[in-house]
């Protein structure tokens, strides 16, 4: 994958240097095939007293190390809980030849640290560049529990933070780091912080940023408790901000159909004024869009029905949509049901009417061999067939996903958050995560597990680890934003 600045031909007029990434999402689709992928790996919360680390995985099918971890960069501290990741610079800076996609940003959800990792010196063996300490962030902004990071065209890095140091959601907001990773302050204007924080995405041509709402850290760090939803400790709103001014312009109440809205994505085409958010607890994909009067509205685009089950903590099991993404050509949307265990592919060429095109089961609580069974309307019980990969029974359920630039390969990990992993899938904490690759038919639509790819984090040198978000060195469909 390309890193740093890329030199492109100027049609016979010499060469013009460009910044990182690609001029458009469609241009990115013809970028080089991925050969490496970076994966955040967690020991925090597992009982193993070792630091979390960034794994480099070889994804080149022609390499002798294909589907193997070839490098591990341990963080210098214990108890971080690495989670999501982003870049110091991406396609939003493509017009700036002085910018370079060099540093991978690793916010630590629990400790509050933010690491900047140098991937340019040696992409196969990244190194630690800088640590932003939580005390510095708290002292200057009051923010803690950092989650999503996105690079800005200005060179700054913006990080959503889910609460204050005491885990109260009221303290959440958006952190700004400068290009040297110094704390600048908050992005949003005073008095314009959201009720809850989680993910965000901006669409500059529409002067808009929209953020989503997980819950109060004081609640979700203790494990999921349905009573906390009733107590108002989890979110159901989207927050519409003016971009780049940081004024909260509108709050969309998704109601009972939109509980726990997590990952949020605009369509990649920067002229488009719509996108989707995955609402985990109600297992709906909600589409948001601009209305003729300039305000924003929403509607349920896809619903995953809960399953009636036996031998579980509740009589009905939601799918729990925890991650989704959109292909760079805005043709397909992919999402996971972490509890049910399936990955889905929808055609969204008409965003108002998504069409299911592919579905594959890669785990879940109701796979054959589990004590949990689903019950049909006729009273008969059933379970899903989940294949073994290279002799391995698949543990947990599909959680984070990443798509190749050309849209033909989908990578899947299975850890959500260590506390929730222990609650819903204790076997994943005990035996570690794994990483799969799913082949995608982009012509007719179909998903099929690649039997030749399996990364087993059960056999890591320091013990089984939890694998979460994935990034390519040259950017991807969940890191890059076009302006």
Image (spheres, rainbow, N blue to C red):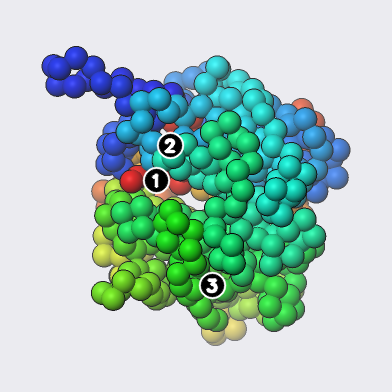
Which residue lies under the disc numbered 3? 237
Q: Is residue 65 above or below residue 89?
A: above
Which residue lies under the disc numbered 2? 90
Residue depicted at x 64% and y 41%: 183
Total tally of numbered discs in the picture: 3
Residue depicted at x 55% and y 53%: 187
Q: Residue furthest front?
A: 190
- Left or right: residue 259 versus residue 136 is left
Residue depicted at x 43% and y 53%: 244
Q: Position of residue 275 (x, y in %)?
A: 38, 62
Q: Nearer the viewer, residue 204 or 91?
A: 204
Q: Residue furthest left?
A: 12
| Cα distance in 3D space between marks 2 and 3 | 28 Å
Q: Is residue 6 above or below residue 396?
A: above
Labels 2 and 3: the sequence-earlier one = 2
Q: Secondary structure at mark 2?
A: loop
Query: Mark 1: few, some, or many residues within 10 Å (few <14, many ≥20)?
Result: many
Q: Position of residue 322 (x, y in %)?
A: 56, 59
| Cα distance in 3D space between marks 1 and 2 | 7 Å
Which residue lies under the disc numbered 1? 481
Labels 1 and 2: the sequence-earlier one = 2
Q: Position of residue 297 (x, y in %)?
A: 38, 75
Q: Nearer the viewer, residue 195 or 27?
A: 195
Residue depicted at x 13% and y 16%: 12
Labelled pair 1, 2 in contact (Cβ < 8 Å) = yes
| Cα distance in 3D space between marks 3 and 1 | 23 Å
Labels 3 and 1: the sequence-earlier one = 3
Q: Is residue 226 visible?
A: no
Q: Secondary structure at mark 3?
A: strand
């Amino acid at each position: 994958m390309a890193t740093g600045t890329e030199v492109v031909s100027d049609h016979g007029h010499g060469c013009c240097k460009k910044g990182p990434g690609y001029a458009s999402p469609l241009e990115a689709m013809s970028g080089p095939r991925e050969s490496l992928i970076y994966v955040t790996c967690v020991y925090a919360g597992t009982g193993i007293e070792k630091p979390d680390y960034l794994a480099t995985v070889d994804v080149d099918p022609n390499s002798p190390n294909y589907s193997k971890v070839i490098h591990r960069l341990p963080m210098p501290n214990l108890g971080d809980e690495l989670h999501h990741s982003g870049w110091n610079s991406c396609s939003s800076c493509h017009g700036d030849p002085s910018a370079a996609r060099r540093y991978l940003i690793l916010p630590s959800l629990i400790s509050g640290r933010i690491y900047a990792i140098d991937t340019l010196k040696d992409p196969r063996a990244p190194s630690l560049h800088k640590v932003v300490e939580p005390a510095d962030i708290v002292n200057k902004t009051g923010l803690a529990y950092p989650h999503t990071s996105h690079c800005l065209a200005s060179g700054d890095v913006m990080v959503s933070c889910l609460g204050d140091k005491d885990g109260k959601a009221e303290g959440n907001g958006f952190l700004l780091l400068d290009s040297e990773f110094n704390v600048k302050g908050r992005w949003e204007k005073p008095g314009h912080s959201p009720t809850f924080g989680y993910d965000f995405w901006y669409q500059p041509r529409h002067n808009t940023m929209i953020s989503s709402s997980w819950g109060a850290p004081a609640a979700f760090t203790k494990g999921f408790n349905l009573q906390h939803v009733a107590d108002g400790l989890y979110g159901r709103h989207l927050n519409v901000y003016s971009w780049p001014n940081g004024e909260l312009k509108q709050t969309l109440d998704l109601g009972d159909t939109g509980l726990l809205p997590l990952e949020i994505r605009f369509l990649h085409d920067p002229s488009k004024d719509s996108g989707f958010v995955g609402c985990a607890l109600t297992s709906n994909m909600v589409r948001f869009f601009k209305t003729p009067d300039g305000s924003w509205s929403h509607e349920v685009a896809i619903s995953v029905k809960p399953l009636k089950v036996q031998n579980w903590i509740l009589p009905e099991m939601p799918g729990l949509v925890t991650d989704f993404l959109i292909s760079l050509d805005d043709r397909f949307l992919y999402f996971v049901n972490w509890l049910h265990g399936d990955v889905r592919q929808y055609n969204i060429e008409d965003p108002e009417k998504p069409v299911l095109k592919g579905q594959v089961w890669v785990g879940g609580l109701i796979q054959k061999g589990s004590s949990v069974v689903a019950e049909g309307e006729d009273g008969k019980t059933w379970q899903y067939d989940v294949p073994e990969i290279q002799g391995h029974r698949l543990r947990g359920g599909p959680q984070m996903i990443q798509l190749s630039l050309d849209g033909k390969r989908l990578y899947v990990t299975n850890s959500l958050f260590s506390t929730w992993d222990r609650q819903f899938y204790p076997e994943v904490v005990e035996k570690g995560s794994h990483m799969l690759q799913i082949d995608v038919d982009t012509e007719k639509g179909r998903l099929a597990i690649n039997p030749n790819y399996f990364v087993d984090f059960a056999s890591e040198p320091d013990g089984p680890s939890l694998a979460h978000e994935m990034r390519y060195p040259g950017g991807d469909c969940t890191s890059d934003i076009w302006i």
